Amino acid sequence: MTHADPSQPIPTSTKARAKRRIAALEEELETLRNERGSKQRKTTYYVAQGRAIRRMVTLYATLEDLIGENDRRYESMSLTDEPTTLEQDILQAGYLELARTLPWVHTKLGTLDHEECEDMLKKLKKGADAARGDDTSSLKDLVAGWVNQEFRPTPLIRPDDKHSRGFANDVCGKLLCPAEWDWDQTCVKAGIRDRTTEFIVSENSWPLFMYEDYKVNADNLEEGFLKSKLLVLAFKAIFTSPSSAKEVDGDGDGADILENNRRARRKSEQGKVKTCVASIINMRKVTPRAIAYIACQVRFALSGISSWRTVDGDFDYEAFWTNIVAFFEVVPGPVTRRRVDKLLEWWTRKIFGTNHRQDLTPDVVSQMSVNTLAEQRRMLEDAAFDSD
């Protein structure tokens, strides 16, 4: 085919041109769909992963605060003598906990541009706040049932009613009463209810519901602290499933091993229905911040306020959470550290049982008899070779 004028187009079929145009538009549409789908999947992932943040990392501080503190410390590494505050230390420990719980976040912060980072943090926060709200709603009903079952108050606490709880309710009032006072004393009960200056209920007191058997040894306030059945039930309900909270295992000592095994078999026979929070975030041990989160949720469930807030009267939930975290993370010395570690071990056995495969680190395994025997054989072989 000859075409004299190179500036003129070669004639084509109208039908062929339409087909090509349609194909180009379809390809463009498919690209847009893929981008939209990718964006939606990313949003869903960020929101889902964010559900761990309030539970495991920080109940009140923003992710920007955690990131800012880590950046500040990195930039001032040369100033080794620069003092830090308790708030700064807890923020930094929070960033480290974030990096352990969601390790990909630290990497993303270093690779995404500013707008992408802001978008990611916004979606993580959305998931974090949604999970906190869901847990608050769940425990509102569950805590009422547990209190009714254990204390048999008259009238029973209604799961759908918060106004009949708090210090107006005799059982809830006793559980919320500061450890340094005796709720059964008329003057204490009246003073707290009348909110007199002699009986100010604040985050500076440990509530009775945090103690084992709801009893306090005034001469040793650490005895039984953070070992209450109510806390364990709530932890199981949130982190392992509400159904698992129906059974609270023993301390995991020898007498409990057979019963724990029977329960494990029953759980496996029931089949997997829904992946629990602990499995999703690969949680194998109970952490201090998870305990602090549960304590705040239980305290709120026992209270008479109907919507989540930071301050309830003279009680500051943010400061309360910080006090619990500081109990674990800010210790005066190695003796206290051992007691804290022992308490965390107790919690882990209560929640996850007596399996310890996650503790079989290379260092631990290297000291066990399989490796020791192998090393002895190697040494004997070497010795025989040298003697030859």
Image (tube, grey):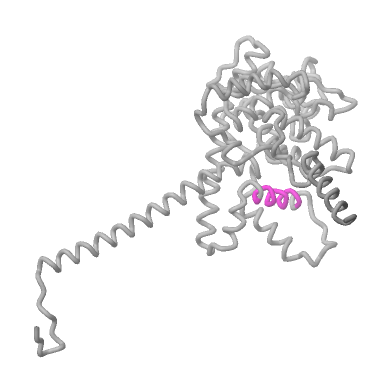
* Quadrant that contains the N terminus: bottom left
x, y percentage for residue 202?
Answer: 74, 33
Q: Label the magenta part by its dominant secondary structure.
A: helix
Q: Residue at x 64, y 44 (%)?
A: 60
Question: Residue 347, relative to residue 115: is it above or below?
Answer: above
Q: Nearer the viewer, residue 24 or 185?
A: 24
Q: Residue at x 70, y 19 (%)?
A: 258
Question: Residue 142, relative to residue 85: is it above or below?
Answer: above
x, y percentage for residue 254?
Answer: 78, 21
Q: Which residues are magenta?
A: 89-99
Q: Is residue 95 magenta?
A: yes
Mark yes or no: residue 162 visible: no
x, y percentage for residue 165?
Answer: 62, 21
Q: Quadrant of residue 133?
A: top right
Q: Residue at x 19, y 62 (%)?
A: 22
Q: Seen in the image, is 135 located left or right of residue 256?
A: left
x, y percentage for residue 209?
Answer: 73, 24
Q: Residue furthest bottom?
A: 4
Q: Residue at x 50, y 62 (%)?
A: 115
Question: Residue 144, relative to residue 369: is it above or below?
Answer: above
Q: Nearer the viewer, residue 12 or 86?
A: 12
Q: Nearer the viewer, residue 102 or 304?
A: 102
Q: Quadrant of residue 211?
A: top right
* Quadrant that contains the C terminus: bottom right
Q: Seen in the image, is 252 located left or right of residue 51?
A: right
Q: Seen in the image, is 254 located left or right of residue 249?
A: right
